[in-house]
Image (cartoon, grey):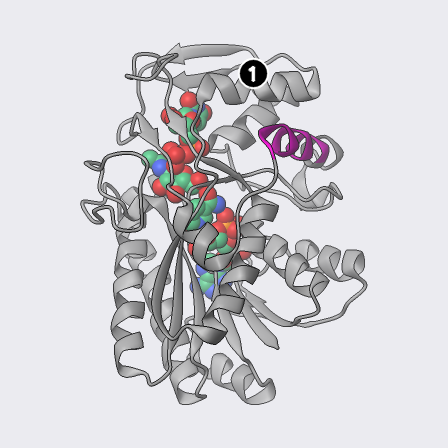
Amino acid sequence: MTIFVTGGAGYIGTHVILELLEQGYAVVAADNFVNSKPSAVARIKQHSGIDFSFYEMDIRDSGRLNEIFTAHCIDCVVHLAGLKAVGESVEQPLGYYANNLDSTISLLSAMRAHEINKIVFSSSATVYSGNNEMPLTEESRIGDCINPYGWTKFMCEQILTDCARIGDGCAVALLRYFNPIGAHESGLFGEDPRDTPNNLMPFIAQTAMGKFSHLNIYGGDYETPDGTGIRDYIHVVDLALGHVAAIHYLCKHPGVSTFNLGTGRGVSVLELVTAFEQSTGISISKKIIARRPGDLAICVADVEKAKRELSWESKKSLHDACTDTWRWQSTNPNGYDS
Ligand code: NAD
Ligand code: UD1
């Protein structure tokens, strides 16, 4: 089976390609490197010992997509390309809507023209409304997104759902990721943020490297056992394996299927910092400051549907995620440029 991976040079894309190659899939990938580097692709080829076609291109370029779909017989698409910085999406809403929606629309049009009818889409827990009971099931209320990034995921889910209705035999998997963390155990692949990291785990790792004097903890007065926010942190390799499971699933299940990809376990900011300290032996200075606008107290997945229908569940521990993050960060202090 040949899988076309968009956003293949990114944090999740590199791990998805590694797992696909490992399991014998043929891969064709594309990325415009707006938030990634060509060296990530070179590392995948070197580490796996497998060459694959890679296209430096914008997924909005329908001419290039048509060329690729003519040159390769694609069985399924994994669509990861997208802009994902929440704060930036508030400052540049049009850029976010244009990139994330137009790339999805171009891709779906080219797929339709070439009769490719299976797609796995990277959605996010951010599509869930803030007024749900925890844990979140796939039936929990969606919408009321608090930033343009979240709305792009919500709208792409709708576009994919509408397209699946008209396409005979179309199969769509909407994967709602919770909080991906960790890195490949080889130490060669991981998250390589462009600027100051917004997300917790890369910020902890860079603080451990001495890039920052301390970690700011956004809020110590939430209604949680230790007062800090609780999230569902999933190891990126487990997440990548969730994509492989979704591809299997699509071969037998037409229509639209939605899955939470998380662990089902809630971990507080302080618990994650402590796990990192225990796994690495490095102590992290921290200060509790005001809450970050838009943050929820708790966001945790109900993962029973993915376990039942995808026969997939996360296997790696928080300790694995901390150890793997640190191996990647400490041996690649400047990310893929190291
Ligand atoms: P990433 O930024 O590392 O990877 C996305 C890749 O897409 C980048 O390599 C970027 O260069 C590429 N890209 C963006 N727009 C493109 C375009 N128009 N044409 C070609 N390439 C383009 O992010 P990631 O963490 O790997 O996330 C992958 C997907 O998963 C994204 O769609 C993101 O929104 C979604 N997601 C990520 C998280 C997370 O925490 N990392 C959580 C939920 C959902
Ligand atoms: C954020 C995005 C979400 C996106 C996800 C990708 C917001 C509001 N939400 O989720 O849309 O899908 O990233 O992974 O930005 N924290 C600190 N100090 C920090 C950074 C974070 O205390 O320096 C806390 C946060 O308050 C939160 C937890 O750590 O309680 C996790 O934060 P983060 O990693 O940014 O992820 P989310 O906010 O869950």
Image quadrant where residue 187 sits:
top right
Q: How many marks?
A: 1
Q: Could you tell me if residue 236 is visible in this image? A: yes
Closer to the camera, 56 or 264?
Answer: 264
- Compared across the picture, whether 16 is left or right of 159 comes to right
Q: Residues within 10 Å of mark 1 (few under 14, many from 20)?
A: some
User: In the image, what residue occupies the spot 62% across and 55% down?
Assistant: 14
In the rendered image, which residue does mark 1 sit on? 274
Q: Is residue 114 above or below residue 250?
A: below
Prevailing SS of the magenta stretch: helix
Q: Is residue 152 above or below residue 194?
A: below
Q: Residue 49: x percent and y percent?
A: 81, 63
Q: Residue 21: x percent and y percent?
A: 69, 64
User: In the image, what residue occupies the spot 53% across and 30% down?
Assistant: 201
User: In the image, what residue occupies the spot 50% across and 11% down?
Assistant: 286
Q: Residue 169: x percent and y percent?
A: 37, 82
Q: Is residue 17 above or below residue 253?
A: above
User: In the image, what residue occupies the spot 39% across and 12% down?
Assistant: 226
Q: Residue 116: x percent and y percent?
A: 46, 82
- Compared across the picture, whether 311 is left or right of 123 comes to right
Closer to the camera, 228 or 55?
Answer: 228
Closer to the camera, 252 or 234?
Answer: 252
Closer to the camera, 267 or 49?
Answer: 267
Label 1 beta carbon within 8 A of ligand 2: no
As helix, strand or loop, the secondary structure at mark 1 comes to helix
Q: Which residues are magenta?
A: 317-327
Looking at the image, in which quadrant does ligand 2 appear?
Answer: top left
Quarter of the figure with the N terminus = bottom right
> Which residue type does callout 1 highlight?
Thr
Q: Is residue 293 above or below residue 222?
A: below
Q: Could you tell me if residue 7 is visible in this image? A: no
Image quadrant where residue 88 sits:
top left
